[in-house]
Amino acid sequence: MLHDGLMTQLKALSVHLFTATGAVFAMLALLAATEAKWDLMFLWLVVAFIVDGIDGPLARYYNVKTNAPQFDGVLLDLIIDYLTYVFIPAYALYASGLMFGWTGWAVLIVITFASAMYFCDTRMKTKDNSFSGFPGCWNMAVIVIFAVEPNYWVTLGLVVALALAMFLPLKFIHPVRTARWRPLSLPMALAWTFFAGWAAWVNFDPASWAQTGLLMTTAYLLCAGIAQQIIPAK
């Protein structure tokens, strides 16, 4: 029994260690960003995104709150998410040359400030384990901007709209935890991860089908929760 208990604690602890690898991938992404290697930066962010998608189910399966309570997995996850979802994508958008003049500073300030407030908002989760407001997934938004390269005014408008959406009563799904439409949402999230990695791998070549797949899956993940608010559950 003692051996079984120790193994359970070690498995739970290993989940925290796995989550912490996201910080390493964040640093690798940042190093790539400082050298303007945007394709490599996004590849590392995709790897961090995969870790973030796996560690939650593992944490619940091994009940880390009970079996490894000396580490706060929620806090650890939020720290890494802020780096990989917010801080590095905001820097990339500012430093990439896709913005012009003061608009670069504007998106940098809007993204980091609004996200800092959202990440500490105790109302961010809904009863069905979705997010209330845009959940600060700037890594997803910025990789689409890199792929499409819209006019900088369009990008500025998109950033401001998403920042405002963080504090509006709009629902955004969690592909794993939101039960409604999960048989569709989870494959869409996996497809998004594939297309994001593919787009970064080919250095955002516009001739690649990755761009189309990235746009389609992003549109679903952004709009599914709002559609659920409009369409009543049966």
Image (cartoon, grey):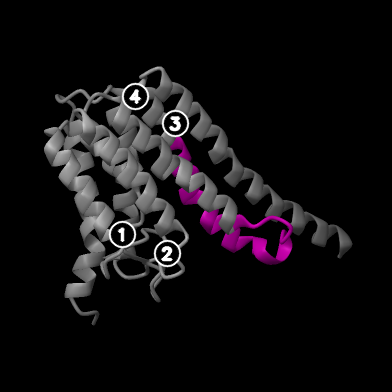
Task: Determine the image quadrant of residue 106.
Answer: top left
User: Against 154, is 58 above or below?
Assistant: below
Task: Determine the image quadrant of residue 222.
Answer: bottom left
**First-in-chain label (1 vs 3):** 3
Element under label 4? helix
Mark 4 = which residue? 38
Q: Which mark is residue 44?
A: 3
**First-in-chain label (4 vs 2):** 4
Do callouts 1 and 4 mark residues in contact (Cβ within 8 Å)? no
Tell me the CA gap for discs 4 and 2.
Answer: 31 Å
Q: Which of label 2 and label 3 is nearer to you?
A: 3
- Which quadrant is home to the N terminus? bottom right
Q: Estimate how packed mark 2 is, as few (under 14), some (14 to 19) or many (20 or more) residues with alpha carbons within 10 Å.
A: some
**First-in-chain label (1 vs 4):** 4
Q: Amino acid at mark 4?
A: Trp
Residue in the image at 44% along x and 40% along y: 84
Tell me the CA gap for discs 2 and 3.
Answer: 24 Å
Q: Estimate how packed mark 4 is, as few (under 14), some (14 to 19) or many (20 or more) residues with alpha carbons within 10 Å.
A: many
Q: What x and y, as percent, mark residue 188? A: 29, 51
- Which quadrant is home to the C terminus? bottom left
Q: Which residues are magenta?
A: 47-73
**First-in-chain label (2 vs 3):** 3
Element under label 2? loop
Tell me the CA gap for discs 1 and 3.
Answer: 25 Å
**First-in-chain label (1 vs 2):** 1
| Magenta stretch: helix, strand or loop mostly | helix
**First-in-chain label (3 vs 4):** 4
Query: Residue placed farthest to the front in the image?
Result: 102
Mark 1 = which residue? 166
Q: Which of label 1 and label 4 is nearer to you?
A: 1
Residue in the image at 52% along x and 30% along y: 27
